[in-house]
């Protein structure tokens, strides 16, 4: 395990890959610890790593163990993130506290991006990023994922923003913060469980080469934000927008009545309810999209590494 600063360490395999400029893909741990139930969470995490390896890249899942941020969890550590109940979800506002206390923390998109960029890794894969929540005018609930996208540099592969969010406001926010949004083989911005939205992406790309070309152009301009690459959920697992709207309305009503959640607890609570309401179809879609993103992310990482080697 190599330390790259006092706060971050790389696992051996990830360290070797970074040193040799081999393709590396980082992954988050909040989806493992909070996004999916056990044992599906562990199976998903292992399968994503296998898919990335199958595409010729090195997977590196990120988590905080006893206050140490680590990129490239080993098998046993991955299992701990799937099982332990004492793990804290981290975003940019509490990661320092979790590290200082020496406790376990799951990294969300925001803190995973922070780690990815500290290590100089170019590609990060997730299911769906956080964004601007519906009713943000009152709640002020805007995910710190968006702040991180504007602050740290990596190609972020996701199935768009999560279906429970205000999609239009999230895209406006991304534009304001100067974060380019690509559609991978799509002109329409995908919304997690749903393949399409009424909103267009900044640019459609049809291959890893095209996505990397945009990232390179960004680099040449000294534009140091992340590049959001949105990949639609595979068609056979997708939900319709009517189905999602109905499930979301029920989930929100239930949570308002039965639970007292706010801040970083809101997203996991709603996702869990929506899955129950749809009889597990949300979970199926979630698994299908994240595995597909892992595949696309690995192809992009391969392309990025070959470009960097060529220069
Ligand atoms: N997508 C999922 N499940 C999740 C998340 C995303 O399918 O659990 C997590 C990601 O880690 C994302 C976080 O960064 O939710 C966003 O949370 P919030 O809205 O509290 O910022
Ligand atoms: Mn929030």
Image (spheres, grey):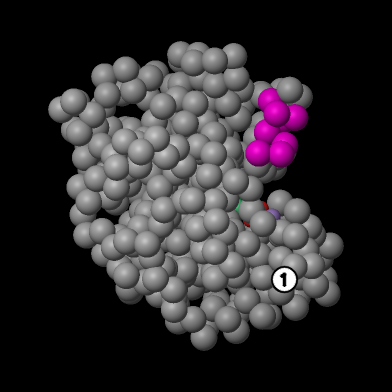
Q: Is residue 111 left or right of residue 43?
A: right
Is 95 a magenta residue?
yes
Task: Judge by depth and name the residue closer to the eye, 279 or 231.
Answer: 231
> Which residue: 80% across, 72% down?
256
Q: Position of residue 270 (x, y in %)?
A: 66, 66
Reply above or below: 149 against 158: above
Q: Disc 1 beta carbon < 8 A from ligand 2?
A: no
Q: Position of residue 76 (x, y in %)?
A: 50, 30
State whether residue 225 appears in this view.
Answer: yes
Q: Which residues are magenta?
A: 92-99
Reply above or below: 154 against 5: below
Within 10 Å of disc 1 (Cα), the crowding (few <14, some 14-19, many 20+) is few
Q: Position of residue 171 (x, y in %)?
A: 51, 64
**Ligand 2 image position (quadrant):** bottom right
Q: Residue 205: which quarter of the image?
A: bottom left
Is 163 a magenta residue?
no
Reply above or below: 257 against 162: below
Q: Which residue is mark 1?
A: 135
Q: Position of residue 253 (x, y in %)?
A: 75, 78
> Which residue: 56% across, 42% down?
148
């Amino acid at each position: 395990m190599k330390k790259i600063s006092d706060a971050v360490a790389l696992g051996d395999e990830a360290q070797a890959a970074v040193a040799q400029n081999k393709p590396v893909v980082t992954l988050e741990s909040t989806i493992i610890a909070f996004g999916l139930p056990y044992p599906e969470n562990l199976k998903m995490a292992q399968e994503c790593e296998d898919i990335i390896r199958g595409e010729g890249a090195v997977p590196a899942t990120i988590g905080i163990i006893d206050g140490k941020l680590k990129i490239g969890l080993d098998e046993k550590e991955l299992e701990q993130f799937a099982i332990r109940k004492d793990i804290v979800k981290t975003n940019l506002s509490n990661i320092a506290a979790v590290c200082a206390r020496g406790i376990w923390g799951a990294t969300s998109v925001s803190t995973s991006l922070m780690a990815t960029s500290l290590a100089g890794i170019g590609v990060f894969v997730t299911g769906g990023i956080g964004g601007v929540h519906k009713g943000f005018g009152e709640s002020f609930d805007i995910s710190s994922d968006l702040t991180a996208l504007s602050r740290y540099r990596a190609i972020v592969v996701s199935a768009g923003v999560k279906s429970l969010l205000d999609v239009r406001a999230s895209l406006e926010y991304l534009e304001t913060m100067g974060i380019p949004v690509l559609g991978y083989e799509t002109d329409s911005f995908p919304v997690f469980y749903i393949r399409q939205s009424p909103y267009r992406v900044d640019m459609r790309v049809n291959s890893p080469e095209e996505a990397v070309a945009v990232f390179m152009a960004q680099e040449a301009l000294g534009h140091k934000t992340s590049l959001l690459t949105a990949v639609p959920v595979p068609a056979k697992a997708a939900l319709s927008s009517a189905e999602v709207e109905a499930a979301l309305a029920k989930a929100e009503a239930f949570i308002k009545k039965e639970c007292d959640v706010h801040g970083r607890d809101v997203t996991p609570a709603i996702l869990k309810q929506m899955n129950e309401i749809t009889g597990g179809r949300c979970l199926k879609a979630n698994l299908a999209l994240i595995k597909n993103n892992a595949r696309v992310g690995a192809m992009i990482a391969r392309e990025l590494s070959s470009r960097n080697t060529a220069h």
